[in-house]
Amino acid sequence: MSTVCGVRISKGIGTVGIALLLAACGAGETAREANGTVHLESLRIKLDALMADSCNSEPESMKPWQCEKYVTQLANMATTLTDAAESGIERLAGPGQRMTAGVSEYRAARCAGTSPVSEDKCVAALTQIADAVAAAERAIGD
């Protein structure tokens, strides 16, 4: 279990529940202010929520198409991490690049549809994304 904005969340909360929690605590989509400043605490909150998603913790137990919203959120997070790396937080470059690669593999294997190229490729892409999320969380630190 993880905590988001002081609320304990279980692994089965799902992407919609995570989005609602993030909206309620003001984390926003990109964890940035209008001036482009990246807030590591906001990134940490969003990463914690993403780690609680079943698509992250148990990709092999999910139908690949069930993780489409999760992957979209990760694509946005990858962009934020890349932007953060370019603005001086270089340690986030690697996790951002790995997230982007995993998202690309998920999409290339047509995992968001009901007839993916290969469910094994989808699980591999989701596992790669989960590893990148964990790496990003480690890079941000406590």
Image (cartoon, rainbow, N blue to C red):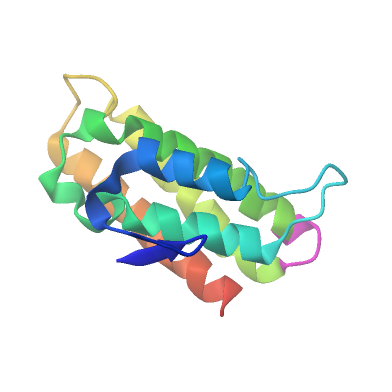
- Position in image of residue 36 (x %, y %): 82, 47
Residue 20 vs 9, above or below: the answer is: above
- Position in image of residue 85 (x %, y %): 71, 60
Q: Quadrant of residue 52?
A: bottom left
- For the magenta stretch, what is the residue range? 85-89
Q: Residue at x 81, y 58 (%)?
A: 87
Q: In the drawing, does residue 135 fall left or right of residue 60?
A: right
Q: Residue at x 21, y 41 (%)?
A: 121
Q: Residue furthest top?
A: 114
Q: Quadrant of the N terminus?
A: bottom left
Q: Quadrant of residue 110?
A: top left
- Position in image of residue 114 (x %, y %): 18, 19
Can the viewer see residue 105?
no
Residue 131 vs 20, above or below: the answer is: below
Q: In the drawing, does residue 8 fall left or right of residue 19?
A: left
Viewer-side residue, 92 vs 35: 35
Residue 39 vs 102, above or below: the answer is: below
Residue 16 vs 142, above or below: the answer is: above
- Position in image of residue 119 (x %, y %): 14, 36
How many marks are shown on the rendered structure?
Answer: 0
86 part of magenta stretch: yes
29 part of magenta stretch: no
Can the viewer see residue 66?
yes
Q: Quadrant of the C terminus?
A: bottom right
Q: Residue furthest right?
A: 35
Q: Residue at x 56, y 54 (%)?
A: 96
Q: Residue at x 30, y 42 (%)?
A: 14
Main SS class of the magenta portion in the image: loop
